[in-house]
Image: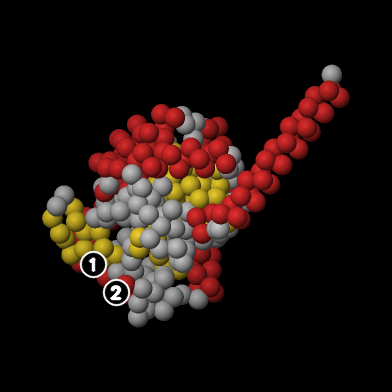
């Protein structure tokens, strides 16, 4: 039990956290993750979001080289887990919102059938979380990231241009109220189901930079495990707003730390990222990926030799 946080997890959840490179900094150099880019559609429009397909040169959310069908996603998982056994987490992080795409659920169903013990992770804006949660539970999603950029509708209304909720467009504060309520209600329900929650917050100077501590307080009340404060990437409708400095981001993290654990090793990964957080193989050359495969095989052979040797000595 983590006494200072009043969190109690079963042994399996502790293992999942310990092997998740986003939830545990100690895991980042030992375990990897794989994002399946099966979710192109989004039901909100954030003013900083630009989704790009067939893009190889950028490392940021919303970017992918291609959109996969569920069958293609399964084949990529097969190959990745065969080549890179250090990958422990399979996630869907876009390039749109996973809960707004039925392909997300089909892809995870296919993967779960073949790899029943893999850890599932997902990222979402939370708009559809309360009603889609039963499907996530059924699929065995263990960790969930919800992006919350404000818990004040006046502020969120400046960050998000509109939300598309059940086919109706809501703008400004009206849309923000719907989204914030669904985010917080969805997190509470997910925690009750035993899902470990991470909250992402994009730090936008001049808009929510004085408000992030209030987000930390709100998610603390809902037993969120970890918070990731990400720096604005100036683009889209927010192209004119500067990115926060590293010092500003750190100061915000420090102010939020008393309320919720802070993730400080985020690399703002692509929607098709795989491998270690600090070593995204989606942007590597084939030659470099082959070298990693060779190294893995050599390491496995050494480990087997050591185990055999130790076993003989004990006998």
Q: Residues within 10 Å of mark 1 (few under 14, many from 20)?
A: some
Instruction: Identify the image quadrant of the C terminus.
Output: top right
SS of the residue at dot 1? strand
Residue 94 position, x and y percent, is 36, 53
Contact between marks 2 and 1 (CB within 8 A): the answer is yes
Q: Which quarter of the picture shows residue 208?
A: bottom left
Residue 103 position, x and y percent, is 30, 43
At 41% from the left and 32% from the top, the residue drawn is 112
Q: Which quarter of the picture shows residue 19?
A: top right
Instruction: Identify the image quadrant of the N terminus.
Output: top right
First in sequence: mark 2 vs mark 1: 1
User: In this orientation, does residue 72 appear?
Assistant: yes
Q: In the displayed orientation, state which residue is furthest to the right.
A: 313
Tell me: residue 136, above or below residue 123: above
- 306 or 199, nearer to the observer: 306
Residue 147 position, x and y percent, is 37, 56
Residue pointed to by mark 1: 161
Residue 248 position, x and y percent, is 50, 74
Residue pointed to by mark 2: 237
Q: In the displayed orientation, state which residue is furthest to the front.
A: 287
């Amino acid at each position: 039990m983590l006494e200072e946080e009043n969190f109690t997890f079963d042994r399996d959840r502790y293992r999942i956290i310990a092997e998740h490179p986003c939830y545990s900094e100690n895991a980042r150099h030992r375990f990897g993750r794989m994002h399946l880019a099966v979710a192109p559609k989004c039901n909100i429009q954030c003013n900083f979001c630009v989704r790009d397909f067939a893009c190889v040169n950028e490392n940021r959310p919303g970017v992918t080289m291609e959109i996969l069908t569920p069958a293609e996603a399964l084949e990529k998982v097969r190959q990745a887990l065969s080549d890179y056994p250090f990958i422990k987490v399979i996630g869907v992080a876009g390039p749109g919102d996973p809960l707004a795409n039925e392909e997300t659920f089909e892809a995870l169903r296919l993967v779960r059938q073949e790899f029943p013990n893999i850890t599932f992770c997902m990222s979402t804006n939370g708009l559809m979380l309360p009603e889609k949660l039963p499907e996530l539970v059924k699929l065995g999603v263990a960790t969930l990231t919800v992006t919350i950029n404000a818990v004040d509708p006046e502020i969120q209304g400046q960050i998000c241009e509109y939300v598309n909720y059940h086919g109706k467009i809501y703008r400004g504060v009206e849309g923000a109220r719907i989204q914030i309520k669904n985010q917080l209600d969805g997190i509470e329900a997910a925690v009750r189901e035993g899902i470990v929650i991470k909250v992402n917050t994009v730090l936008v100077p001049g808009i929510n930079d004085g408000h992030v501590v209030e987000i930390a307080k709100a998610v603390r009340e809902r037993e969120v495990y970890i918070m990731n404060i990400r720096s604005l990437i100036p683009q889209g409708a927010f192209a004119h707003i500067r990115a926060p400095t590293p010092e500003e981001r750190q100061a915000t993290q420090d102010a939020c730390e008393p309320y919720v654990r802070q993730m400080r090793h985020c690399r703002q990964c692509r929607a098709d990222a795989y491998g270690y957080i600090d070593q995204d193989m989606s942007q590597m050359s084939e030659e470099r990926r082959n070298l990693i495969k060779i190294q893995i095989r050599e390491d496995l052979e050494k480990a087997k030799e050591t185990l055999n040797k130790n076993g003989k000595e004990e006998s």
